[in-house]
Image (cartoon, grey):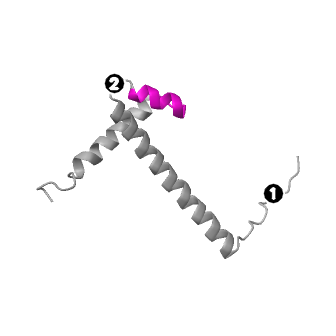
């Protein structure tokens, strides 16, 4: 072993264009995840009993995960009154 202290390599500086590209792609990923979660919850709710398991098999996740997405989807239905309702 050496007695000299270890030093970190200098961190590279990203260009403004590279930073914008990464930010744009991160936003796209976030939006895609949100859309997938909403769709998975909606489809599971639509199919009722057995829907969680069916969606979970397609997405290769646990039925409990889909159950959480379905519960979140149901919560959004409660928060948003139906279009054309008197409660607008």
Q: Nearer the viewer, residue 64 or 55?
A: 55
Q: Which residues lie in the magenta part? A: 51-62
Q: Which residue is rendered at x = 52% and y = 31% of the image?
A: 58
Q: Position of residue 18 (x, y in %)?
A: 68, 69
In what element is the residue under mark 2?
loop
Q: Which mark is residue 49?
A: 2
Residue 14 on the magenta span = no
Work out whether residue 24 can be spotted.
yes
Mark 1 sits on what residue?
Answer: 5
Q: Quadrant of residue 25?
A: bottom right
Q: Is 61 on the left-hand or right-hand side of 8?
A: left
Q: Position of residue 55 (x, y in %)?
A: 46, 32
Compared to residue 69, the image places residue 7 above or below, namely below
Residue reaching furthest to the left: 86
Q: Nearer the viewer, residue 67 or 9?
A: 67
Q: Which residue is rendered at x = 38% and y = 24% of the image?
A: 50
């Amino acid at each position: 072993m050496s007695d000299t202290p270890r030093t970190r390599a200098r961190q590279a500086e990203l260009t403004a264009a590279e930073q914008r590209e990464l930010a744009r792609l991160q936003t796209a990923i976030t939006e895609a995840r949100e859309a997938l979660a909403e769709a998975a919850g909606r489809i599971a709710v639509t199919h009722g009993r057995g829907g969680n398991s069916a969606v979970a098999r397609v997405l290769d996740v646990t039925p409990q995960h889909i159950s959480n997405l379905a519960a979140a989807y149901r919560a959004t239905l409660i928060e948003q009154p139906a279009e054309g309702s008197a409660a607008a």
